[in-house]
């Protein structure tokens, strides 16, 4: 009967080398997993914020399309500038025409809504309810937030004569995370003031 072959055990040095290699691989794997989650977390946040900003532009376009004479007889467009527009429109769940104001304050676009009250209905003295629309707006002087056009599609010069406005273009440049590399997204929406168009016919 042959004797069993002698099994050589790991030496202390070999054991330490194996432990070191295993520890290095575990640390490297942990770093990769953390980087993966951090990167994907930013991409997910970025996607959500861009989608939210896109929906906000769509809502502003929908508001503008509903521009109508105010409850007190005011002209549908009250004021128009490159960073603000004030107009009157029907708002869902409201029975009267509200005054709506989109305005840029710092790097944030807000929406202000004023409901008329009293008899006769009036907007004077009523509280404006303000909500944040888009944060981290990065429009410079070369890219106005609001651009106005007449019925022939010609851009109206500033100061804008509200009586000539037939459509409004919104161009919002937004940086969803200003603490990271500059990824500026351009969101564009256009609204033809259909009720105003009908009034001018």
Image (cartoon, helix red, strand yellow):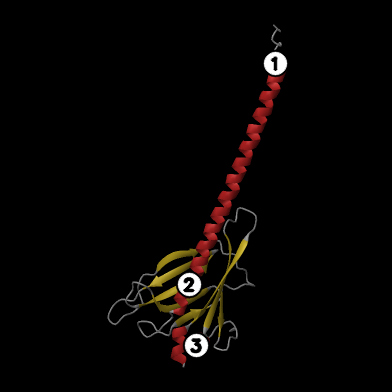
The residue indicated by pointer 2 is 60
Instruction: Name the residue furthest bottom.
Output: 201
Where is residue 34? Give x, y as percent: 59, 41
Q: Which mark is residue 12?
A: 1
Q: Is residue 46 visible?
A: yes
The residue indicated by pointer 3 is 163
Residue 13 sits in which quadrant?
A: top right
| Image position of 99 with respect to 15: above or below | below
| Image position of 129 with respect to 14: above or below | below
Few, some or many C-alpha atoms within 10 Å of disc 2 (few <14, some 14-19, many ≥20)?
A: many
**Labels 1 and 2: the sequence-earlier one:** 1
Q: Is residue 102 visible?
A: no
Q: Residue at x 56, y 56 (%)?
A: 46
Residues 142 and 201: in front is: 201
Where is residue 100? Give x, y as percent: 43, 74
SS of the residue at dot 3? helix
Q: Residue at x 49, y 76 (%)?
A: 85
- Whether residues under marks 3 and 2 lie with C-beta atoms below 8 angstroms apart, the answer is no
């Amino acid at each position: 009967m042959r004797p069993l072959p002698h099994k050589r055990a790991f030496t202390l040095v070999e054991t330490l080398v194996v432990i070191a290699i295993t520890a290095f691989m575990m640390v490297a794997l942990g770093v990769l997993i953390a980087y993966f989650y951090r990167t994907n977390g930013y991409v997910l946040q970025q996607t959500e914020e861009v989608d939210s900003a896109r929906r906000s532009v769509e809502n502003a376009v929908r508001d503008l399309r509903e521009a109508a004479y105010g409850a007190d007889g005011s002209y549908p467009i009250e004021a128009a500038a490159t960073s603000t527009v004030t107009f009157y429109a029907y708002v869902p769940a409201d029975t009267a025409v509200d005054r709506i104001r989109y305005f840029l304050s710092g790097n944030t676009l807000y929406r202000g809504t004023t409901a008329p009250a009293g008899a006769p209905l009036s907007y004077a003295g009523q509280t404006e309810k303000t909500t944040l629309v888009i944060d981290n707006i990065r429009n410079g002087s070369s890219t106005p937030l609001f651009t106005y056009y007449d019925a022939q599609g010609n851009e109206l010069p500033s100061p804008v004569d509200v009586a000539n406005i037939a459509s409004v273009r919104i161009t919002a440049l937004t940086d969803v995370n200003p603490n990271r590399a500059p990824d500026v997204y351009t969101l564009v929406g256009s609204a033809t003031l259909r009720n105003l168009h009908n009034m001018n016919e």
